[in-house]
Structure formats: structure tokens, C-alpha cells
Amino acid sequence: GDETLGQLLPHLLEQLELCQKSLSGYLEAKRLIFPRFFFVSDPALLEILGQASDSHTIQAHLLNVFDNVAYVKFNEKNYDQIQATFSKEDEKIVLENSE
């Protein structure tokens, strides 16, 4: 009962701290590869990296990663291809070869 729990909790805490340290190291490595990730919180970066296979998930985090890029328009035929970027003021920049 309580005695077993008392012995188990310190071990679990140690394992949790080890996981947190490993996760922090992983996120730091990703931030060193792409420094703009330093502007994104750990939970947001985990969401971005965890859903990397779906390029559309970055939409919610664009303003944190890129200065004044509020959202992007994706190509309707080519799911991962960005056609244009839009600022908070709704200014549009069309990307070349995005047709």
C-alpha cells in the first residue's frame, strides 16, 4: 500500500525528470537547426514537430515563427505547396512557381 507507493514515487519522479531533460535537449537541438523555433513555446514546438507530416498544422504558429506572416494559402492541387503568404494586415505575397 502506502509503503510501496512511497518507494515507487521517488523512482517515478527520477524517471520523469530524465524524460523532461531528454525532451528539453531534443527541442534545443531542433531550435539550433532552425533558430526561429526559439520564438515558439515548448508545447507549440512539440505540436509542430509531432505533426510535421501535415504542413497545414503550422498555420496556428506562423506569427510566432515568422515576423508578420499571419497565414499562408496552400495550392489546391498540391497539398503541401504554399502559393502565397498573408500579413496581419492581409497584405499578400504570391510565391513564384506556385501554380
Image (tube, rainbow, N blue to C red):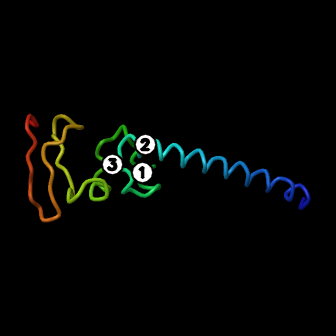
User: Residue at the location (45% across, 49% down)?
Assistant: 46
Image disc number at residue 57: 3
- Camera-nearest residue between 86 and 2: 86
| Cα distance in 3D space between marks 3 and 2 | 17 Å
Instruction: Say if 42 sits above or below 29 in the image.
Output: below
Sequence-first disc among 3 and 1: 1
Discs 3/2, front:
2
Q: Specify the quadrant that holds the N terminus.
A: bottom right
Mark drawn on residue 30: 2
Within 10 Å of the Cα at label 1, are there few (<14), some (14-19), or many (20+) other Cα atoms? many
- Residue 30 drawn at (x, y percent): 43, 42
User: Closer to us: mark 1 or mark 2?
Assistant: 2
Q: Amino acid at mark 3?
A: Thr
Q: Is residue 95 above or below residue 36?
A: above
Judged by depth in the image, the label closer to the viewer, 3 or 1, is 1
Do the numbered discs 3 and 2 sit on residues whose CB atoms are within 8 Å?
no
Query: What is the CA distance from the residue labelled 3 to the residue labelled 1?
Result: 11 Å
- Residue occupied by mark 1: 45
